[in-house]
Amino acid sequence: MNNNKKKSGFTGSLGFVLAAAGSAVGVGNIWRFPYLVARDGGGLFILVYLVLVLTFGFVLLTTDIAIGRKTGKNAWQAFASISPKWGFLGKLTFLVPVLIMTYYSVIGGWIVKYMVVYLTGQGNLAAQDGFFGQFITSPVAPIFFMLIFLAITALIVFRGVEKGIEKFSKFVMPILLVMIIGIAVYSLTLSYTDQGITRTGLDGLAIYLIPNFDGLTVPKFLNILLDAMSQLFFSLSVSMGIMITYGSYVKKDVDLNKSIAQIEFFDTAVALIAGVMIIPAIYVFSGTAGMTSGPSLMFVSLPKTFASMGPAGNIIGILFFVMILFAALTSNVSIMETLVANCMHIFKKERKQTCSWISIYSLVTALVICLGYNMLYFEYTLPNGVVGQLLDIMDYISNSFLMPLISLLTCILVGWVIKPSWIASEMEIGSNGFNKKHLYTFLVRYIVPVIMAILFFQSTGMLNYLTYLMK
C-alpha cells in the first residue's frame, strides 16, 4: 500500500469532535458512571470525577490527540516515530483495541436483543427473573444478535472516515443527546408509593447529586479516587490508540484546544445526564438497593423499573435501548477503526481488505466470548479479586492492566524523554496559543504518573500486597 495515497480525514472540527465524543460516550459510560456515583457517595464521586476530568483527563486526552496529529500516524507507528526505543509502547497500545474488540460486539448484541424485545412489545419478559441469564447462556441467540451488531459496525468502518465514521457520528450524536435528555426529564417526574412511603424522581436526584460523607475514611476516599480515575478511561477513550488514530485525521487548521474542551464537555455532560436518567428512575421503584447493582443495572434492574412504569415503560424501554445501541455503535466503530488503521500499516493492505479481515477476527473472537457463557464456561479469580469469565478476563487485561500501564509510560515519555514542549508546540498550531501549557507540564511530569502507578498497582492487586509488606 502506498502510504502517500492516504489519507482521508475529518472534514472539520465538528466531525472530529462528534466522532471523538461518540467514541467516548459508550455503554460503559452510560451505565457504569451512574452506578459508581450511587456506590461512591453520590455528589462526592461527581466532584472528584469533575476535578479529574479537568486535570488528568485533560492531560491524557491532549497527549493522545496531539501525538496523533503531530505524527500523522496510528498508535503502532506514532510512538516509534517519536523515539525508536519507545516503539514497544505503540504495540502495547495496539493490544487494547485488539482485546476490547473480542467482547464489545457481544455486549452490543445483548443491547440489540433487548431493543428487539421492547420493539415487539415484550418488555415484561425482560423484567422477569432469570431472563438475562437464560439469554446469554443460550447457544444460538447471543451469536445471532452479535452478528447484527458487528455487521453494522463493519459497514460504517468499511465506508471510511468521511463517508462512514464522520457521517454516522453527525447523524447519531445529536439524536443520542436529545434522547438522553428526554428520558432524564421523564425520570424526574416519576413517583411511586410503597407501604405508605412515596419516593419521587426528585428524591432520587438529591441522592445522586448531594455529596454523602457518611463513613468516609482515607482508604475509602482512595477507592473513590481510583474508581473515578478508571472511569476516565471509559469516558475519554484514552490510552487505547483511538484518540491517537482520530487525532491523525485532524487537519492542522483545527484548534485542538477548543476541540478537546468540547469533547470533555460533551462527554461529561452525557455522563452526568445519564445519571439523572437512570438513578432517579431506579430509586423510585427499587429504592437505594437497586441503584448500585453494577453491570446488571442495564439488563436486570432497568427492565424491572420499566415494567413498574406501566404502559409507558415499554416506550421508555424502546427509547432507552435505541439510545444505548447508538452509544455502543459509536464506540465500537472507533475501536474497529483503530484496528483497521494500524493493520493497514502493518500488513500494507487497503482499507476495504483490511476491514474484511478485522471483521473476521472480530467475529471469531466474539463467537468464543459468547461460548464463554455456555460451552466454554469457567470461573477465574482475577488479581483484583473479581471472579470472572472469558469476557471479564479480556476486560480486565485491557482496561485494568494495560490502560493504566500505557498511561503511566506515555506520561514518562512525554514528561521526561521528549519533554512537554513537544506536545505544546502542536497545541499552538491553529490556535491562539496553549494557555494551559504550564498546568499540562506540571501534571504530565509529576502528578499523573504517580496516580497512574497507584491505579496500576491497585488494579493488579499489587497495592494490597505492598501494603501488607509495609505493616
Image (spheres, helix red, strand yellow):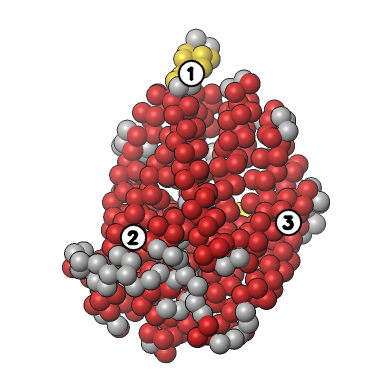
Q: Which residue is mark 1?
A: 191
Query: Is residue 97 at all visible to an observer of this figure?
Result: no
Q: Which residue is mark 2?
A: 260
| Mark 3: secondary structure | helix
Question: As drawn, is 134 to the left or to the right of 170?
Answer: right
- Residue 398, picture quadrant: bottom right
- Residue 371 coordinates in the image, percent (x, y): 76, 57
Question: Is residue 118 shown above or below 447?
Answer: above
- Residue 450 coordinates in the image, percent (x, y): 31, 67
Nearest to N terminus: mark 2 or mark 1:
1
Nearest to N terminus: mark 1 or mark 3:
3
Identify the residue at horizontal 56%, vertical 44% (top origin): 324
Q: How crowded is the residue under tag 1: few (<14 C-alpha within 10 Å), some, or many (20+)?
A: some
Most foreground residue, 81 or 454: 81
Identify the residue at horizontal 61%, vertical 33% (top origin): 317
Kind of residue sitting beneath label 3:
Leu
- Contact between marks 2 and 1 (CB within 8 A): the answer is no
Q: Which residue is mark 3?
A: 147
Work out which quarter of the rendered image holds the N terminus and state it.
Answer: bottom right
- Residue 197 coordinates in the image, percent (x, y): 47, 13
Kind of residue sitting beneath label 1:
Ser
